[in-house]
Image (spheres, grey):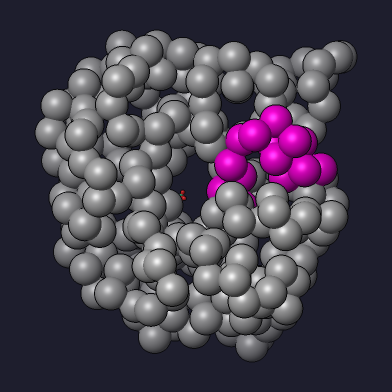
Amino acid sequence: MIPRKKLIAGNWKMNKTPADGVALVKEIVAAAGKNNDVDMVVCPPFVAIESVGKALEGSNVKLGAQNMHPEASGAFTGEVSAPMLRAVFATHVILGHSERRAYFAETDAFINKKVLAALKNQLKPILCVGETLAEREAGSTLKVVQTQLEGGLEGVSKEQAATVVIAYEPVWAIGTGKVATTDQAQEVHAFIRGLLVKLFGDAIAAKVRILYGGSMKPSNAPELLAQKDIDGGLIGGAALEARSFLELINAAA
Ligand code: PEP
């Protein structure tokens, strides 16, 4: 089996103006732009996406969006579509982030429409799944993850599935400084891998990258990234500074 290349993706959330974003990626590109050992993605807010994309040109750092609407165009005030993201050379899109689920009431059915639209437009979805603290304490972590994963991937073909990235993000670990233990994370990652085997077969499941997200930082990344089914990280806070993002890239190499 060919080992899965690790992927480090930065989710900037609602941070960075275009000028701040360009300054940040200039530092990242200068230090790691030619890195071929790790796949690297940055996901700026929409207003910064085009200028950040231009600053990434010629480097190995890819451009991602933090969200999109499933329709290609139309009367959806405030929304951005897959063809629009393609037009600014985005290659990835985060879908179903827990903040979208919690604050914008996104359901698995709606997220699934976005996943299918992204794939139809050759964008690689980074589909986020993960349980809240109450769900973990109630013992329903695996059930929640299964529902979100199966709901998000409904109708995805085997061929398309190979390009999907899954991010396991326990909601209680996002932006809280509380990181899942390596055992907690690996247990859920292995469970997700098993679900992917059932949905798409061994060969495809072996190719899909499953990222961990939730207070990943340079100090805890090496241990997490050493786990069999942890293929990289979706990084919030630590992606906002070049130094920590670069350290995470190095930890994944
Ligand atoms: C995220 O928002 O996807 C995330 C993992 O954030 P943080 O790294 O800040 O916990």
Q: Is residue 8 magenta?
A: no
218 to 10, vertically: above or below: below
215 to 77, vertically: above or below: below
Quadrant of the frame with the N terminus = bottom left
Q: Is residue 115 magenta?
A: yes
Residue most toward the front?
A: 1
**Rendering coords of residue 61 (x, y %):** 33, 33
| Quarter of the image where one finds residue 246 | top left
**Rendering coords of residue 174 (x, y %):** 45, 57
Residue at 36 percent of width and 58 percent of height: 5
**Rendering coords of residue 226 (x, y %):** 28, 74
| Quarter of the image where one finds residue 117 | top right
Q: Nearer the viewer, residue 23 or 5?
A: 5
22 to 184, vertically: above or below: above
Residue 115 vs residue 225: left or right?
right
Q: Is residue 104 visible?
A: no
**Rendering coords of residue 161 (x, y %):** 67, 56
Q: Is residue 119 visible?
A: yes
Residue at 34 percent of width and 42 percent of height: 40
The magenta segment is 113-127
Residue at 55 percent of width and 54 percent of height: 165
